[in-house]
């Protein structure tokens, strides 16, 4: 036994020093060729098969680029080798219970027929915070249980307050007219603008929260797989409050014609409600989040089948003005879905049934082209690319996966996901972590983390007179919102003399750098022989 203890000490010292050296290395690049996925459709939305390399023209930053590789996947072509990661996010507070149930039933059918060996799905809920309802999993009963919980949650009030905001604005307008008729000044036209601003500010905060939750989902993916995010919701405005500002614009137009008294007419001359609306424009935030999804190789699809109107109008306003405000509100309510999906290569399905939308998503996953290029300039986002296909076919561009769905790719996905999801749900290897107090290095923190692996859980193979075990450690850091770093990997091969399986555990030390804002370390271990896995995380 003493001989064994000495051997373990030597082995662990060797691993510890090697871990320090590896932590300082730069992660290897994905290779010289950038991979892209092209979904090509005709005027009816059907996928176009059997295209050749010569049928596609691609430019990066305005410069034509030769296609280094070109392959058709799915219908009419070779089967796609990429495994898929499919995240489904329900914006719970924007959906009625019946809409959630309809979508849940359709998603069950979609995943049942779409998931293949190696594919994983995760179900998420979003209201005041992002909630992980499952881990990454291929188990349909687990997914169904999560969908059932989301479907059965109590339904919040679905009004966004526009009706109440318009009512308050009408009351102010009426007070101004009555005071003017009596020779008094109670409010000015600015009071209407102030009321619209108050409403728009509240809507803006809600939209920012929704966008923040959606943005956090990007961290669950790794670019090494074919990635899809399906957002099910009914409210993601680009310009929160646009409908109410349009309503005030209708009042301003009426006042300018003298229909609302001298006081209203005077104030209307110097007012610009639609100009005020631009102060609440979220387009730049959508662009930033879309770029984040693009870099992770995630195509965002949106399903917004539940259309509703929240503007009741009133007798003080013309039917035309009411209708225009209601139309503006309804169009803006789903404008964010169109922005996010269009910028990532997905589709926003507005007013269409979830089943129909999911059929289209399944077709995208099964029928596409992959191309590899040697970039002449950095591809920071989809806007840097220009792709044209013969005969004027429509083409949507997505960042292609860099991997072939290996066990290591799956581990990367799960380690990233476990920044938010409880890793104890899938810890077959029974690993645990122990972190030393951090040491500050400027704004960064350096943390030594011991990864403790029960030796009896590792698979031993015979190598000469010794036993050997091999495992890979996957490490990522994250912040409280679940945003994750890239995954660092370290593979270890250890030879053991006979009898070592009586020992309790092996301790493997890694030195981790926590950048500012990062406070969590997630570790995954995979046995290279059995492919059994273990996960744990620690907060610093």
Image (cartoon, rainbow, N blue to C red):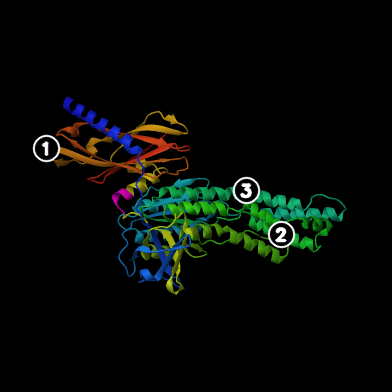
Mark toward the start of the polypeptide (2 vs 1)? 2
Q: Residue at x 48, y 64 (%)?
A: 353
Q: Residue at x 73, y 53 (%)?
A: 192
Q: Is residue 437 magenta?
A: no
Q: Give coordinates of residue 348: x percent, y percent.
A: 50, 61
Residue hosting label 3:
202
- Looking at the rendered image, the quarter that the N terminus falls into is top left
SS at mark 2 in the image:
helix
Tell me if 270 is positioned left or right of 112 in this view.
right
Instruction: Determine contact: label 2, label 1, CB under 8 Å.
Output: no
Give the mark toward the camera: 2 or 3: 2
SS at mark 3 in the image:
helix
Q: Give coordinates of residue 391: x percent, y percent.
A: 44, 74
Q: CA distance from mark 2 to mark 1?
A: 86 Å
**Crowd rating for badge 3 (residues with CA inside 10 Å; few <14, some 14–19, many 20+):** some
SS at mark 1 in the image:
loop
Label for residue 249? 2
**Crowd rating for badge 2 (residues with CA inside 10 Å; few <14, some 14–19, many 20+):** many
**Crowd rating for badge 1 (residues with CA inside 10 Å; few <14, some 14–19, many 20+):** few
Tell me if 193 is positioned left or right of 232 in this view.
right
Residue hosting label 1:
465
**Splitting the image into 4 quarters, where does residue 419 fall?**
top left
Q: CA distance from mark 2 to mark 3?
A: 20 Å
Give 410 or 12, whichever is nearer the viewer: 12
Question: Main SS type for the magenta part?
Answer: helix
Q: CA distance from mark 3 to mark 1?
A: 71 Å
Which stretch did the figure color magenta?
Answer: 405-409
């Amino acid at each position: 036994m003493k001989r064994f203890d000495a051997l373990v000490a030597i082995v662990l010292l060797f691993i510890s020093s090697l871990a320090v050296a590896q932590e300082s290395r730069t992660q290897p690049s994905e290779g010289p060729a950038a991979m892209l996925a092209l979904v090509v459709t005709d005027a009816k939305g059907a996928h176009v098969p059997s295209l050749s390399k010569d049928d596609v023209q691609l430019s990066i930053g305005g410069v034509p680029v030769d296609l280094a590789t070109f392959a058709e996947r799915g219908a009419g072509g070779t089967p796609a080798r990429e495994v898929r990661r499919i995240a489904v996010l329900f914006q719970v507070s924007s959906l009625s219970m019946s809409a959630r149930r309809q979508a849940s039933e359709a998603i069950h059918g979609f995943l049942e027929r779409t998931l293949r060996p190696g594919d994983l799905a995760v179900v998420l809920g979003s209201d005041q915070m992002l909630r992980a309802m499952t881990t990454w999993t291929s188990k349909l009963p687990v997914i169904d249980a999560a969908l059932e919980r989301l479907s059965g949650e109590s339904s919040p009030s679905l009004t966004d307050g526009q009706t109440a905001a318009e009512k308050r604005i009408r009351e102010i307008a009426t007070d101004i007219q009555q005071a003017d008729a009596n020779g008094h000044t109670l409010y000015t036209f600015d009071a209407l603008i102030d009321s619209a601003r108050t409403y728009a500010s509240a809507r803006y905060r809600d939209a920012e929260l929704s966008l923040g939750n959606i943005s956090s989902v990007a961290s669950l993916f790794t670019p090494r797989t074919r990635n899809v995010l399906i957002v099910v919701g009914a409210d993601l405005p680009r310009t929160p409050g646009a409908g109410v500002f349009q309503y005030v614009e209708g009042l301003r137009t009426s006042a300018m014609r003298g229909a609302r008294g001298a006081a209203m007419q005077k104030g209307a001359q110097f007012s610009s409600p639609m100009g005020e609306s631009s102060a609440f424009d979220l387009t730049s935030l959508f662009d930033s989040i879309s770029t984040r999804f693009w870099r992770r190789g995630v195509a965002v699809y949106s399903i917004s089948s539940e259309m509703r109107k929240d503007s009741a109008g009133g007798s003080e306003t013309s039917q035309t003005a009411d209708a225009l405000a209601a139309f503006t509100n309804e169009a803006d309510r789903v404008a964010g879905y169109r922005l996010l999906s269009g910028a990532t290569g997905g589709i926003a399905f507005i007013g269409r049934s979830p089943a129909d939308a999911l059929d289209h998503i399944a077709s995208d996953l099964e029928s596409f082209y992959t191309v590899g290029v040697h970039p002449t300039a950095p591809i920071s986002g989809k806007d840097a690319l220009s792709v044209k296909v013969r005969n004027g076919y429509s083409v949507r561009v997505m960042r292609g996966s860099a991997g072939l769905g290996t066990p290591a790719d799956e581990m990367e996905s799960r380690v990233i996901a476990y920044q938010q999801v409880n890793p104890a749900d899938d810890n077959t290897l029974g690993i645990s972590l122990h972190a030393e107090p951090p040491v500050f290095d400027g704004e960064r923190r350096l943390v030594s983390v011991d990864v403790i692996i029960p030796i009896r859980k590792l698979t031993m193979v015979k190598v000469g007179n010794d036993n050997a075990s091999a495992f890979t450690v996957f490490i990522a850091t994250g912040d409280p919102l679940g945003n994750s770093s890239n995954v660092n990997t370290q593979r270890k091969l250890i030879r053991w003399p006979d009898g070592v399986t009586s020992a309790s555990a092996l301790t493997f030390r890694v030195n981790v750098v926590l950048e500012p804002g990062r406070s969590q370390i997630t570790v995954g271990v995979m046995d290279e022989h059995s492919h059994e896995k273990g996960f744990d995380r620690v907060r610093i």
